[in-house]
Image (cartoon, rainbow, N blue to C red):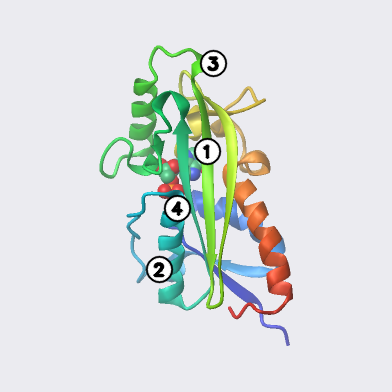
């Protein structure tokens, strides 16, 4: 009898869990979230790069659960702000800000700048860890920060991020549309391409 493989998504963010579960649904594995492991609280992101933070999250969850873990870390890089907020995107407006606080600060910092000077990109780094390997992938989407918030879907900076070649923000798209092009989807697609042959070789012990 075949044992269904398990993978823990190292995130407490229900939006991310939903997006990533949808994207991983074809891998034939059981995806579990941190809700199944209440002993794992907030994991402090003390790294100075997206890679370090994704590693911290994946390593912590793997160590506690003993299961293969997958973690992402995402940053919004705004050219006019020399790449800020970048790795500090979650805490841009201070300690424990709401999504709205972060969006408000970003719009304030860019006040008066025309659309053509508001280039930005989302960058996601994903780390996968099990007993045998640590694997990484990266996904990027270019776009602009809009002059005002638009849309109610998604989370975080979605209402002010308009992807290149689109006339609407991520928050004006449904999840399936966002998942076709997003930074996280691109990083996950690359990770899936690495994981599929790895799982097929049977070296995976989860
Ligand atoms: P983290 O990867 O959870 O640390 O996210 C860093 C910051 O970027 C948080 O403020 C998130 O809300 C935001 N963020 C992460 N992914 C997305 C996304 O797909 N859209 C909009 N904001 C995001």
Q: Cβ–Cβ below 8 Å for labels 1 and 2? A: no
In the structure shown, which secondary structural element does the residue marked by tag 2 occupy? helix
**Residue 122, numbered circle:** 1
Q: Are marks 4 and 2 in contact (CB under 8 Å)?
A: no
Mark 2 crowdedness (10 Å alpha carbons): few <14, some 14-19, many ≥20: some
Q: Earlier in the sequence, mark 3 or mark 4?
A: 4
Q: Decide if ligand 1 comes within 8 Å of the CB at mark 1.
A: yes
Q: For mark 2, what is the residue?
A: 60
In front: label 4 or label 2: 2
Q: Quadrant of the N terminus?
A: bottom right
| Residue 155 appears in view | no
Query: What residue is shown with label 3?
Result: 116
- The response on whether ligand 1 sits within 8 Å of label 4 is yes
Taking the spot 61% from the left edge, 70% from the top edge, the residue there is 30
Q: Secondary structure at mark 3?
A: helix
Bin the neighbour count of mark 4 within 10 Å (Cα to Cα): few under 14, some 14-19, many 20 and up: few
Precedes in sequence: disc 1 or disc 4: 4
Does the residue at mark 3 contact the one at mark 4 (Cβ under 8 Å)? no
Q: Residue 198: which quarter of the image?
A: bottom right
Q: Are marks 1 and 3 in contact (CB under 8 Å)?
A: no
Which badge, 1 or 2, comes first in the chain's sequence? 2
Looking at the image, is mark 2 or mark 3 earlier in the sequence?
A: 2
Looking at the rendered image, the disc whose residue lies closer to the viewer, 3 or 4, is 3
Q: How many angstroms separate mark 2 from mark 3 (CA)?
A: 41 Å
- Residues at circles 1 and 4 in contact by the CB criterion of under 8 Å: no
Q: Residues within 10 Å of mark 1 (few under 14, many from 20)?
A: many
Disc 3 packing (10 Å; few <14; some 14–19; many ≥20): few
- What label sits on residue 13 in the rendered view? 4
Q: Quadrant of the C terminus?
A: bottom right
Residue in view at x 62 percent, y 48 percent: 185
The foreground one among 182 and 149 is 182
Q: Give how far across and how far down residue 10 sits, in percent.
A: 47, 62
């Amino acid at each position: 009898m075949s044992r269904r493989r398990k993978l823990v998504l190292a995130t407490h963010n229900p939006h991310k869990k939903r997006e990533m579960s949808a994207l991983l649904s074809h891998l034939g594995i059981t995806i579990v979230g941190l809700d199944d492991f209440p002993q794992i609280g907030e994991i402090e992101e003390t790294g100075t790069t997206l890679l370090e933070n994704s590693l911290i999250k994946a390593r912590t969850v793997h160590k506690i659960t003993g299961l293969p873990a997958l973690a992402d870390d995402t940053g919004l890089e705004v050219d006019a702000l020399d790449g800020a907020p970048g790795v500090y995107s979650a805490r841009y407006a201070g300690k424990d800000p709401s999504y709205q606080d972060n969006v408000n600060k970003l719009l304030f910092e860019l006040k008066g700048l025309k659309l053509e000077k508001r280039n930005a990109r989302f960058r996601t780094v994903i780390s996968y860890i099990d007993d045998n390997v640590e694997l990484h992938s990266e996904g990027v989407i270019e776009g602009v920060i809009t002059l005002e918030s638009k849309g109610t879907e998604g989370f975080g900076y979605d209402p002010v991020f308009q992807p290149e070649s689109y006339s609407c923000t991520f928050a004006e798209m449904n999840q399936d549309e966002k998942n076709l092009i997003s930074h996280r989807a691109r990083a996950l697609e690359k990770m899936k391409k690495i994981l599929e042959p790895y799982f097929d070789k049977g070296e995976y012990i989860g």
